[in-house]
Image: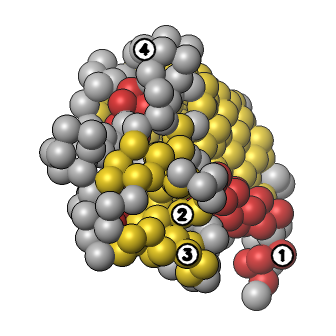
Amino acid sequence: MDLLKRPMLRFALCLMILCFSLGASADWLWGSDEQPQPRVKVVKPFIEWRTGPASGYPVFHASEKGEWLTLLKRKTAWLKVNDEKGREGWVHVEDVLETVDATGEKVVLNEPRFDDFGSRRWEMGLLMGQFEEAASTAIYGGYQMTENLSAELWATQILGSASEIQMYNVNIVHQPFPDWQLSPFMTLGAGHIFIEPKSTLAVPEDRDNSIGHAGLGVRAYVTDNYFIRAEVKDYKIFTSRATNEEALEWKIGLSIFF
C-alpha cells in the first residue's frame, strides 16, 4: 500500500505495535520485605498450570484439591505461582478466585491498575481523527510532571485532498481530577506546521508556519495500563499574510501508561 510508504504512518504503526507489546509485558508483584507473598489453598478438584501467561501455552502441571500455592506476580488475567515443591507456572485468575486463604475465606484479588493510572509518569498513544475536513493520524509521548500537569510531544500527519501536512507541537496538559476513571483535561500548546501542496497545474510554494492551540479532552481508563483518549483542539496558524488562519481538529485513540 502507498500509505505504508509514508514515514509518519510507518512510525505510527511501529508505535501502536510497541504500545501493545508494552501492555502485554506489564505485570505487578506481590509481597515485600514487610509482607510475605500471599498463599492460597486449592478447593477445586484441580487447577491447571501453563508454561506462560496465555491460553496458548501448554498445560504442564495440575494442582490438586488441598494443595497450597504462593502468588508471585500477575500479568493481565494470569498469575504466576509456585508450590511447596518449588515448581513455578501460570494459572488463570478465575481459578485463583475459587481458592481460599489461610482463614478459609474465598480469595479476593485487588485490581491495582487504576491506582497506577493516577500515579503514572509516562504515557504514549496513537490517535486518529480529522483536521478540518482532512484525515489526521497523530502519535504522542507524555511525562507527568506533577499530579495535575504533564508535558507532551506530538507529531501529526494530515492527508487532505489538496495538500499533505505534517505538524509538530509541544503541549502542557492540565488534568484537574487525576483520580477520576473518566478524567477531563485542558491543553495548551505551540509548534510548527509544514504544508506540502499536491501536484496541480499551477504549483504553489510549500508553506511552514508557527501554530498555537487550546483544547479540551477526556481520558477514560479501560483496563490494565490502557486508556482511551479523546480531544478537540482549536488551532491558530500564524501566517505571513494579512490575516491568520484557524482550524479545528478532533481525534480519538488508544494510549498506554507506565
| Distance between mark 2 and mark 4 Cα atoms | 35 Å
Rendered position, 175 above or below 241: above
Amino acid at dot 4:
Glu
Q: Which residue is mark 2?
A: 90
> Is 85 on the left-hand or right-hand side of 48?
right
> Is 16 on the left-hand or right-hand side of 215?
right
| Distance between mark 1 and mark 2 Cα atoms | 41 Å
Q: Which residue is mark 3?
A: 61
Residue 122, percent from left and from top: 60, 31
Residue occupying image coordinates x 58% and y 62%? 89
Mark 2 vs mark 4: which is more N-terminal?
A: 2
Q: Nearer the viewer, mark 4 or mark 3?
A: 3
Circles 1 and 2, Cβ within 8 Å, touching? The answer is no
Q: Which residue is mark 4?
A: 147
Circles 2 and 3, Cβ within 8 Å, touching? The answer is no
Residue 70 appears in the picture as rendered: yes
Task: Examine the image and state in which quarter residue 50 appears.
Answer: bottom right
Mark 1 vs mark 4: which is more N-terminal?
A: 1
| Distance between mark 3 and mark 1 Cα atoms | 48 Å
Residue occupying image coordinates x 52% and y 71%? 49
> Is 1 on the left-hand or right-hand side of 85?
right
Residue 78 or residue 210, whichever sits in front: 78
Amino acid at dot 1:
Lys
Mark 3 vs mark 1: which is more N-terminal?
A: 1
Residue 147, percent from left and from top: 42, 14
Circles 1 and 4, Cβ within 8 Å, touching? The answer is no
Q: Which residue is mark 1?
A: 5
Rendered position, 125 above or below 24: above
| Distance between mark 1 and mark 4 Cα atoms | 40 Å
Residue 24, percent from left and from top: 59, 59
Mark 2: give few (<14), some (14-19) or many (20+) Cα within 10 Å: many
